[in-house]
């Protein structure tokens, strides 16, 4: 049976010199370390019973790198937060630490050393000739040149450089506006605060992939906000934070406009009350958020314009059960919404988005509901359901595309609307299709013969028309199309399949009717479907260009 004993030589404040000098950075319990390509947190420093020397007990970020939970031979030296994530390593296995200043000096100082050295030699030789002193030495010239070069740096990236502390960054590059220190070894926010305090012009900061403890109260964080007064964008992705942690840290950033907090551990949301007044962009991609009710708690962030929720676990979008599309008093300025690769499985979720006042851009790809339709039809449904939308999946929605989508939507659901409007199912239809009354007022209800009626036992195959498409050059293609397909869609397809031969504009389509001795019927109303022109299987569609 394991004995839960911490040996007498273990001390939470114990430090290891890791084979370095007194004035260099030391490792202590809580330090972040890197061994080969694996990152971890030191949980123990000391001797292990039965083994010689000093060992580090490490909990790895990737649990598969570990071997146990912190116990050896029945003695517990430390505990891991994830099963099997712990192991012991020797101090000499740890990658050497750096300060941020050292990393900047090495990366930006060494990049052009050869070029700088050659230039320096040229300048020095010219000075020697002018001064007629061939043996004079220009001591420190290279250092002055390098310092002047670093002074001009506005954007600095020292990603994955084993940085643990700030160092004297102000002396090197005090004018930096954008700093990337992602995938380093910061263990808490105190070092990041010291770093930012030296960069008064800092506007963007990337500290993603750092596991930093929040060991300061919100009051202390707020007091240190003076060091982040100009910060507008922060990236804290892959830091293992919950929303409560992000909300606490927001006290550091009084003027923050964009927060990137992707792939953390956000499951639930607490409405912000004292911070995030200026936030316009929030990216929570890859967090395990499944309940839309949690997302609604962000709705009171008054200036929020962009919300990114890609790769979350959202299944349904529901604001309320209102039977109309009355606009909401939350997310009042939200213009752009990302919902790619979620688990949305019903079309009502898209109808709900019409209740947002200002939604202009939507990114909605690879959700289960889209498997029920081809891409073009699914896109038309989304356009028809959200009246304010101006762009879908990076494609601008033209006036013609919207008119076609909305008219097809009326034809698709018009028969159902007529059947249910005076029945007990009227409220269910109104909830599912909350824009329908608005569209009826806009276009009117089409004739009954244009309304799509779905036969109960008719397969999709039986509704397809096999048509031959050919152009004036003799190119021939055979394809199957649903009879409910609009002429506009067929025109668009023809544009892609047949060459224009230098001609401008859209093609004009004619149906060649063999029963009428080859008479050509112009498909002149692109808003109508194929059935309107009595097109049947076996007919030929002639593609001509104006």
Image (cartoon, rainbow, N blue to C red):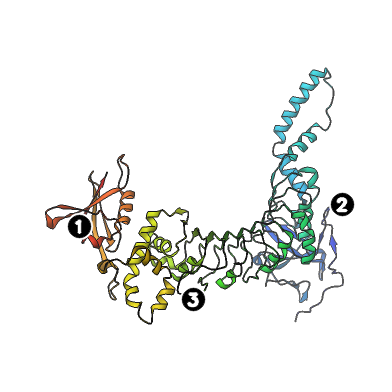
Q: Where, by quadrant of the figure, is residue 435 drawn?
A: bottom left
The x and y percentages for residue 402 are: 39, 58
Asked if residue 438 can be seen in this view, the reply is yes
Q: Are marks 1 and 2 in contact (CB under 8 Å)?
A: no
Residue at the spot 12% in from the left edge and 56% down from the top edge? 516
Q: Is residue 475 above or below residue 380?
A: above
Query: How far is mark 2 from mark 3, CA to CA?
Result: 66 Å
Q: Residues within 10 Å of mark 3 (few under 14, many from 20)?
A: few
Mark toward the start of the polypeptide (1 vs 3): 3
Query: How far is mark 1 from mark 3, CA to CA?
Result: 47 Å
The x and y percentages for residue 539 are: 20, 57
Q: Nearer the viewer, residue 390 or 269?
A: 390
The x and y percentages for residue 280 are: 61, 58
Query: How far is mark 1 from mark 2, CA to CA?
Result: 87 Å
Q: Secondary structure at mark 3?
A: loop
Judging by the rendered image, the residue that carries numbered circle 2 is 23
Mark toward the start of the polypeptide (2 vs 3): 2
Q: Is residue 171 left or right of residue 364?
A: right
Q: Secondary structure at mark 1?
A: loop
- Disc on res. 113: none
Q: Is residue 219 left or right of residue 519?
A: right
- Disc on res. 321: 3
Judging by the rendered image, the residue that carries numbered circle 1 is 539
Q: Are marks 1 and 3 in contact (CB under 8 Å)?
A: no
Q: Are marks 2 and 3 in contact (CB under 8 Å)?
A: no
Residue at the spot 27% in from the left edge and 55% down from the top edge? 525
Foreground tag (1 vs 3): 3
Residue at the spot 81% in from the left edge and 48% down from the top edge? 168
Foreground tag (2 vs 3): 3
């Amino acid at each position: 049976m394991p004995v839960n004993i911490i040996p007498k030589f273990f001390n939470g404040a114990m430090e290891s010199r890791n084979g370095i000098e007194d004035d260099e950075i030391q490792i202590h319990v809580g330090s972040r370390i890197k061994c080969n390509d694996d990152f971890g947190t030191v949980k123990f420093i000391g001797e292990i019973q039965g083994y010689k020397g000093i060992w580090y007990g490490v909990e790895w970020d990737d649990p598969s790198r570990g071997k146990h939970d912190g116990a050896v031979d029945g003695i517990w030296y430390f505990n891991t937060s994830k099963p099997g994530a712990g192991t012991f390593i020797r101090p000499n296995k740890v990658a050497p630490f750096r300060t941020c200043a050292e990393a900047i000096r090495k990366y930006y100082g060494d990049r052009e050393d050869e070029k700088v050295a050659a230039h320096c030699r040229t300048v020095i030789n010219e000075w020697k000739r002018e001064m007629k002193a061939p043996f004079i030495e220009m001591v420190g010239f290279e250092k002055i040149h390098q310092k002047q070069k670093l002074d001009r740096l506005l954007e600095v990236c020292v990603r994955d450089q084993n940085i643990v502390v700030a160092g004297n960054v102000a002396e090197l590059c005090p004018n930096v506006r954008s700093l990337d220190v992602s995938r380093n070894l910061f263990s808490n926010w105190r070092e990041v605060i010291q770093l930012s305090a030296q960069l008064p012009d800092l506007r963007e900061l990337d500290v993603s992939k750092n596991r930093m403890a929040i060991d300061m109260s919100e009051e202390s964080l707020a007091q240190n906000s003076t060091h982040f007064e100009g910060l507008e964008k922060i990236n804290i992705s892959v830091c293992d934070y919950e929303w409560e942690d992000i909300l606490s840290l927001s006290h550091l950033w009084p003027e923050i406009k964009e927060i990137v907090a992707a792939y953390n551990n956000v499951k639930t949301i607490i409405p912000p009350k004292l911070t995030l007044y200026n936030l316009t962009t929030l990216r929570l991609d890859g967090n395990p958020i499944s309940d839309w009710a949690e997302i609604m708690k962000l709705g009171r962030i008054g200036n929020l314009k962009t919300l990114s929720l890609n790769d979350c676990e959202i299944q349904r979008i529901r604001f309320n059960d209102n039977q109309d599309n009355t606009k909401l008093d939350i997310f009042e300025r939200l213009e752009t919404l990302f919902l790619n690769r979620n688990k949305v499985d019903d079309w009502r979720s898209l109808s709900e988005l019409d209740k947002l006042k200002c939604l202009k851009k939507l990114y909605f790809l690879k959700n289960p509901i889209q498997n029920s339709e081809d891409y073009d039809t699914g896109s038309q449904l989304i356009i028809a359901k959200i009246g304010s939308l101006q762009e879908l999946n990076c494609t601008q929605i033209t006036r013609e595309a919207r008119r076609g989508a909305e008219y097809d939507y009326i034809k698709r659901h018009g028969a159902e609307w007529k059947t249910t409007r005076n029945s007990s199912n009227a409220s269910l239809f109104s909830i599912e299709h909350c824009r329908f009354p608005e569209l009826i007022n806009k276009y009117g209800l089409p004739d009954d013969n244009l309304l799509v009626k779905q036969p109960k036992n008719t397969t999709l195959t039986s509704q397809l028309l096999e048509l031959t498409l050919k152009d004036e050059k003799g190119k021939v293609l055979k394809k199957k199309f649903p009879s409910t397909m609009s002429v506009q869609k067929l025109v668009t397809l023809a544009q892609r399949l047949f060459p224009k031969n230098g001609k401008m504009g859209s093609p004009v389509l004619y149906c060649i009717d063999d029963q009428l001795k080859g008479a050509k019927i112009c498909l002149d109303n692109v808003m109508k479907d194929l059935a309107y022109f009595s097109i049947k299987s076996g007919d030929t569609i002639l593609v001509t260009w104006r």
